[in-house]
Amino acid sequence: AQKITQTQPGMFVQEKEAVTLDCTYDTSDPSYGLFWYKQPSSGEMIFLIYQGSYDQQNATEGRYSLNFQKARKSANLVISASQLGDSAMYFCAMRVIQGAQKLVFGQGTRLTINP
Amino acid sequence: EAQVTQNPRYLITVTGKKLTVTCSQNMNHEYMSWYRQDPGLGLRQIYYSMNVEVTDKGDVPEGYKVSRKEKRNFPLILESPSPNQTSLYFCASSLAANTEAFFGQGTRLTVV
């Protein structure tokens, strides 16, 4: 079975600082994908970034990067130069490539950016 | 515009009254899923579908039904809703296992 753990229920960061949101995962499947989603207060789920288990380089998308450490089974999201609009709930998720098409989510981290 | 559309966005209903939440995607995706989101529990998969006429249970399927008669539509049916099904529901679709899931806007359901 797959499991995602996000150990930070809430984080408070000053605007323009970088922030790291932690995510560890557990799976015995060798082929999987890791995703980060943002959920603002309006409720929608916004895809941020994807990392495949066989990808050699860490994924980056604009101000978002994923610090993928396969041996430690961690997939931390790094947001550079945080903005007030980054305040939201952030979810880490995993999907194995074979079998049931299920995204397994962590419990989320609520990020608050202070001006 | 590529999107997943859920309806309704908000629904208050009474225990036992059958309801359907619709979901439609315009991206020709094969994979579709339903999730429910509850505080402290993240999102949990209810049902998923890998293609037309192919559906399977997720982690919390009790009390729900789905159908996939057409590729674009994946309705969620609550035959006899109960208060413990009060939740925020999301429909999602994806092209493949290693691509992102696109989510609908969510349906906030309250069962009284």
Image: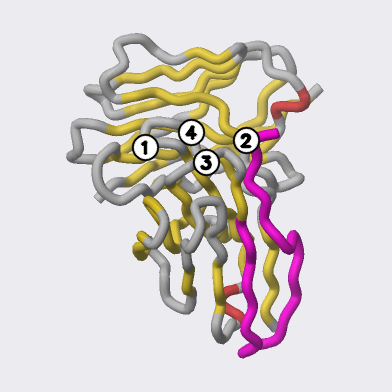
Q: Secondary structure at mark 1?
A: loop
Please say whether residue A115 is visible from this viewpoint: yes
A52 shown above or below A98:
above
- Residue A61: numbered disc: none
Residue under pointer 1 = B97
Q: Looking at the picture, does residue B36 appear above or below residue A25?
A: below
Instruction: Name the residue tied to disc 2.
Output: A46
Which residue does the numbered mark 3 point to in the structure image? B28
Protein chain holding label 4: B
Residue A58, how many percent across, how many down? 39, 13
Kindly identify which numbered label has been placed on residue B100: 4
Q: CA separation, marks 3 and 4? A: 14 Å
Describe the element under mark 2 as helix, strand or loop.
Answer: strand
Tag 2: residue type? Ile
| Cα gap from disc 1 to disc 4, whole angstroms | 8 Å
Residue A112 point in image, percent of width and height: 70, 33
Which chain contains the residue that carries disc 1? B
Mark in the foreground, 3 or 4: 3
Q: Residue furthest bottom?
A: B16
Could you give the CA–CA distance between mark 3 and mark 1, rounded to whole angstroms? 15 Å
Closer to the eye: label 3 or 2: 3
How many angstroms separate mark 3 from mark 2 (CA)? Answer: 20 Å
Identify residue type, mark 1. Ala
Q: From mark 1 to mark 2, how far is it between C-alphas?
A: 17 Å
Q: Are marks 3 and 2 on the same chain?
A: no
In the image, are marks 3 and 4 on the same chain? yes
Q: CA distance from mark 2 to mark 4?
A: 10 Å
Classed neighbour count for the residue bearing mark 3: other residues with Cα under 10 Å, few (<14), some (14–19), many (≥20): few
